[in-house]
Amino acid sequence: MDNSHKADIEIDYLLIVDDEEKVVDVLVKSFEEDYKILATTSPLKALSLIREQPVAVILTDERMPEMRGLKMLTEAASIRNTTVNIILTAYADVNVVIEAINSGLVYRYVVKPWDAEDLKITVRQAFERYEILRQNRLLTEQLVIKNKELHANLEELKATQQKLLRNEKMAMLGQLSASIGHELKNPLSRIKGAVSLLRDDFQPENNEAVELLRIIDNEVMISTKIINDLLDFSRERKAIFKKQYLNHIIDSTLFRLNIPKHIQVEKQLDPAIPLMELDDGQIQQIVINLIMNAVQAMENGGKLYIVTELVNGKAELIIKDTGCGMNQEQLSKIFEPLYTTKPKGIGLGMSIVKILVEKHRGTIDLQSRENIGTKVTITLPLTITN
């Protein structure tokens, strides 16, 4: 039996459930002027109505042959846990109902035979409680949304502060590097040239001298890298994008690099990656910095993986090593200027990589575990949009 009228107190329904049709009729007539009514003699039908309609208050008998009232309310709570429940009961079942009240399943109970006015007051209070709970839920939802917005704003502010600090460090390093970079680069070039000439004069069997020259050459390479990092960090060169193949740039960069023999290189370049808008020099610098980091992390040997893939319309460059790795604290600071995990270097390599990736509208992700290795994933768009 369904009966609905316009509500004066609440737009949601009062659901009446009793296995005796005469009782249902009496209850409907008592409340039809004040509330929208759903009424049934079947608890199973009541559960169906709860699924279909916005029920605010349930008024149900406890003893019904098809299903006990408390059992029905328990199942109703799994469908719509916002209803306020009133149960009609005999004296013999009061203790059970009180336990249900203590558990929060039932709001009030009314003992049969009930007083009509007392029952109306109880139902009105149930609707008032429903409205208070509904308002509380709305306020809670709004609070959750505001908290999320606040968290997002705080994260944005934190990112802005970190960017300002990074820019301040860049300005300071720019003044420093501009004054000393070129002065150091010229003598290092002469040293490197002298080492090359000396190497030609030594016989192959003079292992000690050859090894010393190799050490000098390697130290010059490291020193030159530090100076280049300083110079690159000090000047804001605008990227010049041209249609180029990412794989070709990687191949030419690898050809120029002298990767130690104790490191095994595995290269997998996806031929499906099309022409992209890239700055050749900046991509080379990204690759050089990442590979040198990987090499320095594998002093005792290991594997270097260089992979490109076309993923969801973007190009991914993955450089992975089996080196010493980093802990979480080191990983969280790796992009900060002047932060380094190596005994040699000034901590600009990864800062430069991040800047160059961002110039290409790309993203960089680092994953690392101590004594296992590091994986760097760079994602680049195929075209650059202003």
Image (cartoon, rainbow, N blue to C red):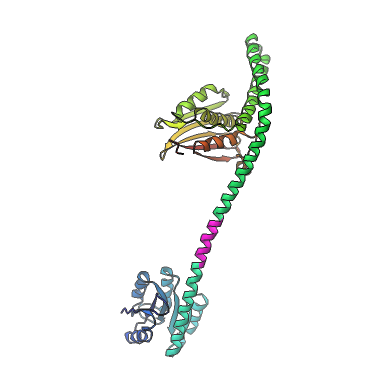
Q: Quadrant of residue 28?
A: bottom left
Q: Is the magenta stretch mostly helix, strand or loop?
A: helix
Q: Quadrant of residue 303?
A: top right
Q: Where is residue 117 in the image (x, y as percent from the top left)?
A: 44, 89
Q: Where is residue 25 in the image (x, y as percent from the top left)?
A: 33, 85
Number of numbered labels in the structure image? 0
Q: Classify 165 as above or below 214.
A: below
Q: Classify 352 as above or below 121.
A: above
Q: Classify 148 as above or below 163.
A: below
Q: Can residue 343 be seen in this view?
A: no
Instruction: Report if residue 124 lies within the magenta region.
Output: no
Q: In the shown orientation, is residue 184 left or right of residue 103?
A: right
Q: Position of residue 363 (x, y in %)?
A: 51, 40
Q: Position of residue 186 (x, y in %)?
A: 66, 20
Query: Residue 126 versus residue 41: which sits nearer the camera?
Result: 126
Of all residues, the one furthest to the left in this rendering is 1
Q: Can residue 182 be seen in this view?
A: yes
Q: Quadrant of residue 112?
A: bottom left
Query: Residue 180 versus residue 318: which sits nearer the camera?
Result: 180
Q: Classify 89 as above or below 229.
A: below
Task: Write down the region rendered in magenta.
Answer: 139-150
Q: In the shown orientation, is residue 199 left or right of residue 88?
A: right
Q: Residue at 54%, 22% (x, y): give it.
A: 256
Q: In the shown orientation, is residue 16 left or right of residue 337?
A: left
- Quarter of the image with the N terminus is bottom left
Instruction: Report if residue 141 lies within the magenta region.
Output: yes
